[in-house]
Every structure is written in C-alpha cells, then in structure tokens.
Image (tube, grey):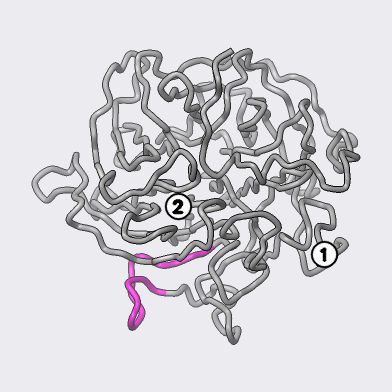
Amino acid sequence: MMKLPTLLCTVICFAVQTCMMGNSFAQEPTMAGGVNQSALDVKVERAFPNLTIERPVVITHAGDGSNRLFVAAQKGQIYSFANNQTVKRADLFFDLSENVTYKDNENEEGLLGLAFHPQFESTHEFFLYYTTTAEPHLSIISRFKTLPDNPGKGDPASEEVLMKIKQPFWNHNGGTLEFGKDGMLYIALGDGGKADDPLKSAQDLSTWLGKILRIDVNNADPGLPYSIPKDNPFVNRTGARPEIYALGVRNPWRISFDRQTGDLWCADVGQNLWEEISLVTKGGNYGWSDREATHPFGPTAKEANSAMVEPIWEYPHTDAWGKSITGGQVYRGTRVSKLQGYYLYGDYVTGKLWALKYDARTGKVTENRTIAWPPSLPVVTYGEDEEGDVYFTTVTSGGMIFRYAD
C-alpha cells in the first residue's frame, strides 16, 4: 500500500494521540441511541477523472452564474475550470505562492481559506486566509480583486490586508472563510496549536484564537479595513475582541453554511478521544479546552452546563470511526436526490464517509449513515458548486476531486 502523505490541520500528531490515561473510551457516540447508522445506497466517483491538483484544500465557486469551480492549493495557487467531467486542464486563476509559507513538516500552514464576495460579479473581490512568508507563523486575511482588464485572473498587487493573526505554533490554524446569508464574512480559527490548548486561548475572549469571527467587509470602522457588526455578541464586553461570534473551538476543519436554512456547521478536530460536529450560534461557547465533545477534558474539566453548547454529534477515536474529522457540507443539489438535506463529512485518518441527518425540531441527529468507499483515502476538504452539488478532495495520486452518485 502506498504511503499516505501528511496534511494540514486535520491530522497531526496531537489529533491522533490516544488518551494518556489509557484506551478506555466508548465504542459508540454518546448520542447514538435510536440513530439510524445503516449504510446509505450512494456511490462515490471521480468528479473529474482527467484532472489532478496538488494539495487541494478548498473547493468552491464564485457565484457568478458560470458554475465554474475554483480549487485553492495549499502552496498558494488557485485554479479554475469548467464543471464538466471531461475537463482535462485547470486554469491558473491566481498565484500567491511566493508569499505563502508551506512546509511538509509544518503542514497545517499555507493557503487555507478562499471565499468569493457574494456580489463577485460586480465587486470582483475574493478573500484569502494564508500563512505569510513575512514572519514565522503569521496568518493573514486579505481582500484581493481580479485584474482590471481580465476578470478571469486575480491580481496579486490588489492585496488589502484585513487581519494579521500571530500564531504561537504551526498547527491548529483553522482557516475557513465563508460568507453567510447576512453578507458577513465568517472566519474559523483554531486555538493556536500544540496540545491541550497551552495558552488557554479558546476560552479567552481577549484573543481571536479558538474562535469563529464575523466581520463586515463592505464597510470600515475608524482605524480598521472592515467594520464590526453591531449585533456581534461581545461588542460591549470589556476586554473582549468584538469580532468574536463564537468561542471554544480547537481546530475547526471546516465550517460551512447550509444554503437553504442558513445554519452554520462546524466540524472540530479533537485531541485525545473524540471528534465533534456542532451547529454554531451567536455567542455560543463550544467547550474546548474544558470539554472535548460531550466529555470533561484536562485540568480545567467541566461537566455539561448551561454556559456551554454541546455538539450535535461526536465519534470516538477507533478504527471503526476515525481520528480526525473533515467537514462537511449539507447537500442541496439535485443530481443525487437521496442525499437531500444530509450533512456530508468524512475522516482524514480512516477515510470513512458519512451522511448525517439532523432534526431541527427536536434538536437531535436522527441518521448517521455510512457511505461505502473502497479506496478509503484521506478526506481533505469539502465544498459545493453553484448548483449545490457537493465535492470532496484527497491529496493522494496528485490530488483528486470526488463526488457522490446514485
């Protein structure tokens, strides 16, 4: 069997540790009772059999009516191509590789986030999250525009830096950028790295680390290249960063919006024993590092309480499940009708795939169906096209893109 490559923030030595107190974890998720876990009759296929892209960490679209796909490569390039299974070539839309840091032994850095402005057709703006070469472990969130005479190419000279985020370590960068239905830009940041959240960042409102942020990129407050939404939950909290929307996450890989409901989904990579999926709400505290999924964690361990939001789903670190979650997208396409409304996600370590159904009325998961996939390759990231069809990527064999099929 070929040796699997190392990767970014979904799998690192800390994410796959077994518990220091022993391997005495549950074999099933705590909330699994009554949940349909049977196999779902869905296949997986190469979406573009003639196309490979090295280290594809984002797959998305520009919302410009073209239904073209855009793939961000971790080393700093963005490619675009026609959404056609016969496509053989991806065009280089943008190249920031000279300004992006990526190292195989620090493989959770690089170009990690890409989002197009909701009105990209008129603004020609797109936003990136990347690790800069300017200094070690510095994350940058920037606005870029396309070339004035060629909207099919991004202009590196157009960069406007919105945020600089000093990372204490090389791992747990998070990096997802997503626009919500409210037009705000949401930013997922890990706790800064190492193990056990040593700086206790995730529960510290004075730092952006370990948080989901929310900013308005269409306006600017005095002294800022963006504005703070007035309804952000900690705007008036003394000592709190006003950009914070939610807190208590370890290494969110990734967040995504359900295009139909507007719900914000977050897959958070665990440390010792548990991987988790949460629905993110304004001001929500998701527990890390006082809790890992639905369980007390570490020296500051806390039992379930009203101040912290429990995940809607968790799974244990076992060979039957996995050790590093990769989220995830709610399927709203039409090509595979039986997937409608399922949150599709996988695991980087085991390569397993699932389709999860959540009942918003009861607040419970009703299904977590397995999807057979004989290759079981490491699942890197998920994304959707303009029509709501869902794709996921791997870094094996040059970097491949997959989709679901009847």
Residue at mark 2 to residue at mark 1: CA–CA distance: 32 Å
Q: Quadrant of residue 227?
A: bottom left
Residue lying at 53% horizontally and 68% vertically, measured from the top left: 208
Q: Locate residue 218, reporting x and y percent.
A: 33, 66
Question: How many other residues sit within 10 Å of disc 1, few (<14), some (14-19) or many (≥20)?
Answer: few
Q: Earlier in the sequence, mark 2 or mark 1?
A: 2
In this rendering, would 343 be left or right of 63?
right
Confirm whether the magenta stretch covers residue 215: yes
In this rendering, would 268 be left or right of 171?
right
Q: Which residue is mark 2?
A: 177
* Amino acid at dot 2: Leu
Q: Start and end of the magenta stretch?
A: 213-227
Residue lying furthest bottom in this view? 238
- For the stretch drawn in magenta, what is the main secondary structure? loop
Residue lying furthest front in this view? 105
Residue lying at 67% horizontally and 61% vertically, measured from the top left: 197
Could you tell me which quadrant the C terminus lies in? top right
Q: Which residue is mark 1?
A: 299
Element class at badge 1: loop
In this rendering, would 60 be left or right of 256?
left
In this rendering, would 278 be left or right of 235?
right
Could you tell me which quadrant the N terminus lies in? top right
Q: Locate residue 198, reporting x and y percent.
A: 67, 64
Q: Locate residue 308, reporting x and y percent.
A: 77, 64
* Amino acid at dot 1: Pro
Q: Is residue 111 above or below residue 135?
A: above
Q: Quadrant of residue 137?
A: bottom left
Element class at badge 2: strand
- Name the one closer to the observer, 55 or 215: 55
- Name the one closer to the observer, 367 or 310: 310
Residue lying at 68% horizontally and 29% vertically, measured from the top left: 354
